[in-house]
Image (spheres, helix red, strand yellow):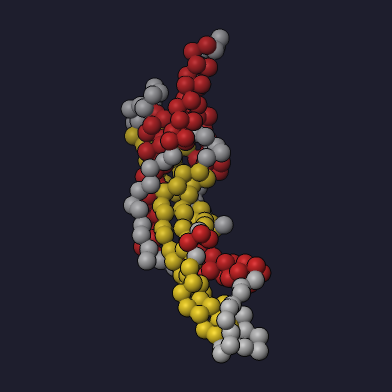
Amino acid sequence: MRKIKNKIVTFLLIVLLVIIAVLAVRVYLLTSNTKAEITIGEYLSTVVIKEAKLISTRVNIERDIMIDVSDIMKKKVTLRFHGTALFTTDLEQFGIEDIISDDENKQVTIYIPPTQLEIYLEDEKTTIQEIERGPFVFSIKVSHEEYKKATATITQEMLQNIKDDVDIQKESEENAKAVFKELIEKILSVSEFNDYEIIVEFRNDEISTE
């Protein structure tokens, strides 16, 4: 029914953008006329791609819903919807104020924004599971409005189902920290801060949903 991938590798595009941003910062520092030192907080807040979202956990879901389109005759159809729940970290909400550095002990603690839970339905996978109809009813049609209403209901049910699953919530939080730490390690590996210990924690916000 539901399959959790323990760790989602960040998109190659994001990694490529990070590398480009790192190189750009390094070129700027080398060509700058002033030799002002840059802190690890300034470095990270400059390099992290603000428009990106990191996917940390993906959950596949399927759920049935019965649509009643009866008039004077009995007409009911049960559809099975397939969806994907994604837990993401929005880097646009990440800033220098979320970075606490301890230069003496070469340690940096980063507080990441809460994960966002998004549900995506895969309409092409929707299937008919059951049809109930009265005598002399040869076909059943579901209108666009009825289908749209069903998808809205299913989306909310899937969303609530994931929110109520404590194990998925816990795993998504651990995955989010691991994926973000991996991203920061890639960034710092080509900088003067490559020997810093990285600690990732959540800000004190609730998990948000879209």
Point out residue 82 in the picture as x, y percentages from the top left corner: 47, 63
Q: Nearer the viewer, residue 193 or 107?
A: 193
Q: Give the residue drawn at x 61%, y 73%.
A: 142
Q: Give the residue drawn at x 56%, y 38%.
A: 51
Decide: is 51 above or below 166.
above
The residue furthest top is 33
Q: Give the residue drawn at x 60%, y 69%.
A: 147
**Number of numbered discs:** 0
Point out residue 113 in the picture as x, y percentages from the top left corner: 50, 47
Point out residue 27 in the picture as x, y percentages from the top left corner: 50, 16
Instruction: Indicate the quadrant containing the C terminus: top left, top right, bottom left or bottom right.
Output: bottom right
The image quarter containing residue 197 is top left
Instruction: Indicate the quadrant containing the N terminus: top left, top right, bottom left or bottom right.
Output: bottom left
Q: Give the residue drawn at x 50%, y 40%.
A: 98
Work out whether residue 84 can be spotted.
Answer: yes
Work out whether residue 112 can be spotted.
Answer: no
Decide: is 14 above or below 65.
above
Decide: is 127 above or below 35.
below
Q: Left or right of 92: which side holds 195? A: left
Point out residue 174 in the picture as x, y percentages from the top left corner: 37, 51
Decide: is 93 above or below 66.
above
